[in-house]
Structure formats: C-alpha cells, structure tokens
Amino acid sequence: MRLVDTSACIEWLAGSPLGQTIEAELPMRSEWLVPAIVQLELTKWPIREVGEDQANQTIAFTTTCTVVDLDTAIALSAAELGAQHRLAAADAIIYATARAHSAVVLTCDRHFKDLPGVRYIAKPAA
C-alpha cells in the first residue's frame, strides 16, 4: 500500500514537472490509501485554485481508492507520532494512518523527509 500525501497528489493533479516524477511512483488504485483528512485537503485546494467541478472530480477519484476514516486508534497514534516527530495534526494523522496500514507515504512535504516509511520527493528550489 502507498499513501499519497496531499502535497504529492496536488503536484500530480496540477501536471507540474514534479507531478510527472510523482506519477511514476503512483500505485494502482487498489494499492492507494487515502485518509479522510487528505480528502478534506484535496477538496479545499481545487475549490480555491480551479473551481468546484475539479474538487468534485478529485473527491470522486479518491473514492475509487481505499479511503480510511479517522478512528480512535489512529487518533491516539497520531497524537503520539505528532509529539515524537513534531508533526502538525493533519501530518500526524496521515503518518499514523500509513503506519496503521503498513503503507509507505509518498510526499513532497519536508515535514516527512527523514521519517521511516516515507518516500520523500523534494520540490525543486524556487
């Protein structure tokens, strides 16, 4: 399983040069893990950047993957991992979800850079 973090998913959806690199790392949909918090973040981004129709298409895509709700076990793990690795709440939930499902996190988010079980792809310097 692979959990595609919001940052990587947005690059892929935007078709950026980095998104093309990420595309080569994307799993089949049956192996793609999507935490509900990523659905929230992926809904906010297209509404803000490209419109509600794109947001609806993005959410429709995520429902074809394995969607994971936030439950008590993941919340407790996220609290612990967040404190241990100094992660914001959303990042801690994402990381805890991946760990609960033995999934690798695919991300461009530097907060995850040195964590075990993460495939970090750096954004090019601006």
Image: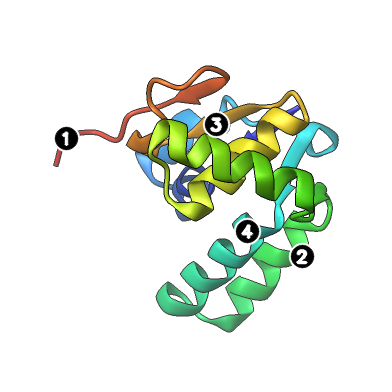
Using the image as rendered, state which of residue 73 and residue 40 is in the foreground.
73
Q: Name the disc covering residue 85, or none.
A: none
- The amino acid type, in three-letter code, at marker 3 is Leu
Q: How far apart are marks 3 and 4 (CA)?
A: 15 Å
Q: How far apart are marks 4 and 2 (CA)?
A: 15 Å
- Residue 84: x percent and y percent? 45, 31
How packed mark 1 is, by other alpha carbons closer than 10 Å (few <14, some 14-19, many 20 or more), is: few
Query: Circle 1 sits on which residue?
Result: 125
Query: Circle 3 sits on which residue?
Result: 106
In which quadrant will I find the N terminus? top right
- Residue 68 as seen in the image, left or right of residue 20: right
- The amino acid type, in three-letter code, at marker 4 is Ile
Which residue of the protein is positioned furthest toward the bottom in this rendering? 52
- Residue 58: x percent and y percent? 65, 63
User: Closer to the observer: label 3 or label 4?
Assistant: 4
Of helix, strand and loop, which one carries label 4?
Answer: helix
